[in-house]
């Protein structure tokens, strides 16, 4: 019992155990023997979580006792072996494969339809010009110079249309959206109906009657190309220009740490707005660091583990004493909770100690890096005196000076919970890059002293993410005032709220230039 009472926390004993602590050594021995007898006959009831460290405490304690070697003592503890799979893992893998296959099929299907429609559009004017020469060449009337000028016009217009369509529609896809882009689908349907209507008119009025006026046929093909150019202009307005004017202000909040940014967006659908927000997130938000969130969880687990209540008098034949002991233990737990209201002091001193350690290790890191770069300058001066074949390249120079700053950098990254964001290879590459471009120590340290945006880190932190759009409204509908949707990934989610930019009424106030003029009247008489 003494060994359990020495644990950090409070141990309350109901019944006679409270009075036994006020006697001498003899009463303590009698209480110890009595508690042993009761423990052998009755089960111990624990009303709070056990005093052993929780999983979170174990992880935190493991981080505190880790040494400064890169990955040598890091051990990942898992519940299954390396080659075992649970039923949930199999279901998740199957779902991921189905989703990936569905997305790939839809992407290739959409691209195939776009290519077929593009070939139909560009081959239709040429077919209008070629078919009369194939079907009834003897009946055609020669049009001479007029037709040749129209041929040149059709050729250049088709070339311009080809380049414009390639620049607008055949760009690399930035993301896979859950629904079809409405405006692009409407434009494709419009072009298809337009080409079909031209073919119907061509078949009824030209092919059936075998029109002999070839100049009219050429002008008909020119009108088709002109109409396609106007449709492309409409596509530029709907797909590019319409969304340029800001109409909504969206607030993006990361659910884990509350990091917030504000952006202005135009007339966009919810899925297009989500895509724009994700692109801004990778460039503007600092990298998500789950290790920084473990401190508060470990602190809460420590406070829960510090409270331990025993009821040694509980049993089938002692119900009344058990009820009294239960009520007394509840009262003592409430008193302990009131005493724990001073936990803000612990939080204050913990944060102050952490800031002190960060400043101390930052100073050591700055000094170590400055000394390393000073050593580089000396090496460069010595290499100028050597033969050209003995000159050290930036990669070798980085590997030569890296050990002098490695320990200070490792300690600083562990203190600031950034050790998982930077590997030894990436640090050496960045050091070689700084040496190659003759950068200062401050420029080298900026990547580690200040957390950068997500896109600056390796692909494991940003490219392999799959986002899920959660919205009550249809994702193809436009943004509105008060629209709320979520962008969810594995570790966190982005909560997006949109507000309409208010209408601004400006008025003009005219100020008469003569109102600024005044007359200074001086009196010649002065008082004596």
Image: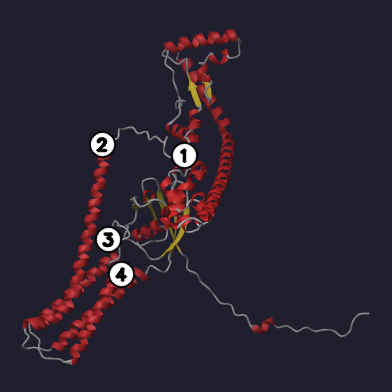
Q: Secondary structure at mark 4?
A: helix
Pick the front one: 420 or 498: 420
Pick the front one: 177 or 201: 177
The residue pinned by badge 2 equals 87
Q: CA distance from mark 2 to mark 4?
A: 46 Å
Q: Earlier in the sequence, mark 2 or mark 4?
A: 2
Q: Earlier in the sequence, mark 1 or mark 2?
A: 2
Quadrant assignment for the C terminus: bottom right
Q: How is the image coloured?
A: secondary structure
Query: Dot 3 surroundings within 10 Å: few (below 14), some, or many (20 or more)?
Result: few
Q: Earlier in the sequence, mark 1 or mark 3?
A: 3
The mark lying in front, picked from 3 and 2, is 2
Q: Earlier in the sequence, mark 3 or mark 2?
A: 2
Q: CA distance from mark 1 to mark 3?
A: 40 Å
Left or right placement of residue 519 versus residue 37 in this view: right
Q: CA distance from mark 4 to mark 1?
A: 47 Å
Residue 205, can we see it? yes
The answer to whether the residues at label 2 and label 4 have Cβ atoms under 8 Å apart is no
Residue at (54% x, 13% y) in the render: 16
Q: CA distance from mark 4 to mark 3?
A: 17 Å
**Picture coordinates of residue 397 (x, y %)?**
46, 51
The answer to whether the residues at label 4 and label 3 have Cβ atoms under 8 Å apart is no
On screen, 339 above or below 503?
A: above
Q: Earlier in the sequence, mark 4 or mark 3?
A: 4
The residue pinned by badge 1 equals 294
Left or right placement of residue 501 versus residue 469 in this view: right
The residue pinned by badge 4 equals 168
The mark lying in front, picked from 4 and 3, is 4
On screen, 481 above or below 234?
A: above
**Picture coordinates of residue 140 (x, y %)?**
9, 88
Query: Dot 1 surroundings within 10 Å: few (below 14), some, or many (20 or more)?
Result: some
């Amino acid at each position: 019992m003494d060994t359990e009472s020495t644990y950090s926390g409070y141990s309350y004993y109901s019944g006679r155990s409270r009075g036994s602590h006020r006697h001498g050594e003899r009463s303590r021995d009698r209480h110890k023997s009595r508690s042993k007898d009761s423990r052998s006959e009755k089960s111990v009831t624990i009303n709070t979580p056990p005093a052993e460290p929780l999983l979170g405490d174990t992880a935190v304690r493991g981080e505190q006792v880790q040494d400064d070697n890169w990955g040598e003592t890091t051990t990942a503890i898992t519940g299954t072996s390396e080659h075992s799979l649970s039923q949930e893992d199999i279901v998740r893998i199957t779902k991921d494969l189905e989703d990936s296959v569905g997305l790939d099929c839809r992407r290739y299907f959409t691209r195939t339809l776009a290519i077929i429609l593009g070939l139909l559009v560009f081959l239709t004017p040429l077919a209008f010009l070629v078919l009369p020469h194939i079907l009834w060449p003897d009946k055609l009337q020669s049009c001479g110079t007029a037709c040749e000028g129209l041929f040149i016009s059709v050729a250049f217009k088709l070339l311009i249309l080809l380049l414009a369509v390639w620049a607008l529609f055949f760009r690399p896809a930035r993301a896979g959206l859950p629904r079809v882009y409405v405006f692009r689908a409407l434009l494709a349907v419009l072009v298809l109906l337009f080409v079909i209507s031209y073919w119907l008119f061509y078949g009824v009025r030209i092919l059936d009657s075998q029109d002999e006026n070839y100049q009219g046929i050429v002008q008909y093909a020119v009108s088709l190309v002109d109409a396609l150019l106007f449709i492309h202009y409409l596509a530029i307005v709907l797909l590019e220009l319409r969304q340029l004017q800001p109409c909504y202000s969206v607030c993006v909040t990361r659910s884990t740490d509350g990091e917030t940014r504000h952006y202005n967006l135009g007339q966009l659908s919810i899925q297009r707005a989500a895509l724009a927000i994700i692109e801004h997130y990778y460039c503007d938000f600092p990298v998500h660091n789950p290790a920084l969130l473990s401190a508060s969880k470990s602190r809460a687990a420590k406070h829960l583990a510090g409270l331990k209540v025993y009821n040694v008098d509980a049993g089938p034949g002692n119900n009344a004493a058990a009820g009294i002991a239960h009520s007394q233990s509840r009262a003592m737990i409430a008193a302990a909770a009131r005493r724990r209201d001073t936990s803000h002091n612990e939080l204050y001193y913990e944060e102050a100690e952490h800031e002190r350690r960060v400043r101390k290790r930052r100073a050591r890191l700055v000094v170590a890096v400055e000394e390393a770069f000073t050593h580089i300058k000396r090496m460069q001066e010595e290499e100028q005196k050597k033969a050209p074949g003995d000159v050290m390249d930036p990669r070798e120079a980085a590997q030569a000076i890296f050990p002098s700053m490695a320990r200070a950098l490792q300690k600083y990254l562990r203190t600031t919970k950034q050790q998982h964001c930077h590997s030894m290879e990436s640090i050496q590459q960045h050091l070689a890059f700084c040496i190659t471009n003759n950068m200062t120590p401050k420029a080298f340290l900026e990547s580690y002293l200040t957390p950068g945006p997500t896109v600056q880190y390796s692909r494991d932190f940003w490219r392999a993410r799959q986002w899920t759009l959660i919205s009550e409204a249809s994702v193809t509908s436009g943004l509105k005032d008060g629209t709320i949707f979520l962008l969810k990934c594995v570790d966190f989610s982005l909560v997006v709220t949109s507000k309409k930019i208010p209408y601004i009424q400006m008025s003009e106030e005219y100020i008469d230039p003569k109102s600024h003029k005044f007359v200074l009247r001086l009196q010649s008489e002065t008082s004596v």
